[in-house]
Amino acid sequence: MLLQRLVEYGDRIAGELPAEFYREKQIHWVLDIAADGSGMKLHSRKVSGRQRDQVVSMPVPYVQRSGTKVPPYLLVDTAEFVLGVPKKAKDGQVTEKDRDEALRRHDAYRDFVRRWASSAGEPEAKAAEVFFSAGRAGWELPDEVEAKDTVAVMVGTRWLHELGSVKQLWAEEVRARKGGAAERTGLCLVCGEHRALLATIPEPVKKGAIPTAGGSNEGQLISINAPAQGREAMTQLVNTPVCHQCGGRAMAVLNHLVACERHRRRFRDDGVLLWWTKKPDPDSVLAMFFEDQPEAADIEHLIDSVNKTPSPAAVQRTDADAFYSLSLGLNNARLVVRDWIEVPLAEAKKNLAAWYADHGVWDAWTGRTRYFPLWQMALSCGRWQGERYAPDSAPHGLEAELLHSALHRLGPPARALPLLLQRIHADRRVDAPRLALLRLFLTRSSNPQDRPMPQLDKDSEDPAYLCGRLFAVLESVQEAALPDINTTLRDKYFSAAVAAPGITLRRLFTDSGAHFKRLRRDRPAAHNALEKRLFEIYSKVSDDLPGHLTDVQQGRFIIGYAHQRQDDILQRQAAKERKQAAIPAQQDVPAQEPAAV
């Protein structure tokens, strides 16, 4: 199924893909052959790391090759093949063995080029045939040329590897190499037609395309090298019959997707997610979901669009579009398919809209709901460093697990809640991303009681939620009475209150009397408002203060605390606005004339 969808997508974007069995590569040297083949010039195209914008890169012949006696590519290859430059040891010396191998590879390269040139009809082919038939005599190569450098060949203004005859011969050569010693024919599992079958997949995923914690390497999607790995001890693709066209097209599409920023999401630790749609011009909503910082207005539009009831005429129209996503990891030289999703596009949009709706948190300062990208929610389980989260401190693989939850409309991974609570206790910090992840846990809980609202729920009777609200009001009382205090209630008692609110909150409630005494003297209006708020909450929970809270209950406590803090901010803002509005009104009253003496 996966290969079929890749091939279908490849047929749709055929114009964007390189020629068959071609891959994008950086060119380090250009071998410029004279029009009559009598000589050449070697031009350097190497650039430093600061000049990446000047890199010469283009699709060139490529196929996976391994072993000691590897065959050459057609025209574009390493300097060892094209120019006969031998490898150097670590000490800079060249051994006799490496020199002989370089000559062998160069001879094989020249024979391959002459085989193409003798049957090609382009005038540039004749120049190449004359040049490579003359041998290496008289060649003067710069010392900077290294055996591993990529060398492309051109005659005049034409790149030889772009000629039609080169593409045709190279495709035939790859089929011959990858078809095995005895070429098999049979039913292809991808296209369902009787064709010549591959012995091995011709092209792996490019090295470095998939982030990995281990050593980076090229990755094969289908590969059976040992008899113990295959059914009935059969190796290669005997049990997975794939034809040349489908195998080459599927891997070309896979490399296209991992290189396309619009259809790729690289996880911060390891792995990558690729996505595409069945029909062209995918909705921007899908691309928005994988952005680092999606716009709140776009998210709200998505939520509104999926919540609207469609008209009867719209319901009758069947949308044949589909959404596909593929999550890949890398284990040595093998691709690991972590997740594969194939759902109608409308369902995918609903799942993404639900993801945002279930974790959105209200921001009292801006008066809007905030939404967060996947990476930030995963990083919220990491360590806080004072101004930001510590890089690479988030649990390994959490971002990919959250993505799975979003696309499948499932709850977050169970391991994330205790990890998040641990960081909240250690950092004594409850910020918006952490609050969003907590809300997502509770919103997608199987317990009907765990359905927190984005804002303060004054009707909630949940003891844990009320305890969080109570602690927030006690903190506000301390802030109002002692605005310049260095160590707040949150600094000293937050972790204890979250874990065991019964003992801690009763003590803090008793100690608040000293703060209210100061407020009654200095700020009577604040005293009355805070006292009313505190006793209103305490009266609901005083007879049922829980001794200890579970992880889920601690999540409710923290959400109640955050909601009450935000509501306190709104109350203070409203009081400040009322005070500012009253001052101009008093200034507008005309002053009385002084009495006559």
Image (cartoon, grey):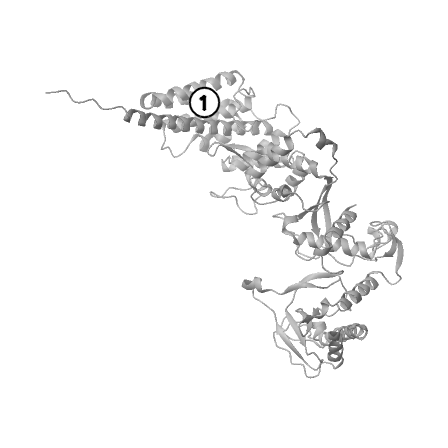
Quadrant of res 151: bottom right
Vertical arrangement, residue 262 with respect to residue 347, above or below? below
Of the 4 image quadrants, the one containing the C terminus is top left
Residue 220 location, x and y as percent? 75, 54
Would residue 264 be seen by someone viewing this image from the given angle? no
Return the residue at label 1.
507
Q: Residue furthest left?
A: 597
Residue drawn 89% across the image and 62% down it: 182
Residue drawn 22% across the image and 24% down it: 591
Vertical arrangement, residue 134 with respect to residue 277, above or below? below
Vertical arrangement, residue 305 with respect to residue 332, above or below? above
Residue 291 location, x and y as percent? 59, 45
Q: Residue furthest front?
A: 313
Secondary structure type for disc 1: helix
Would residue 507 be seen by someone viewing this image from the given angle? yes
Of the 4 image quadrants, the one containing the N terminus is top right
Q: Nearer the viewer, residue 247 or 350?
A: 350
Residue 154 location, x and y as percent? 68, 72
Q: Nearer the viewer, residue 169 or 62?
A: 169
Crowding around mark 1 (Cα neighbors within 10 Å: few <14, some 14 to 19, many 20+) is few
Vertical arrangement, residue 380 with respect to residue 253, above or below? above
Residue 87 location, x and y as percent? 68, 72
Q: Amino acid at mark 1?
A: Arg
Quadrant of res 45: bottom right
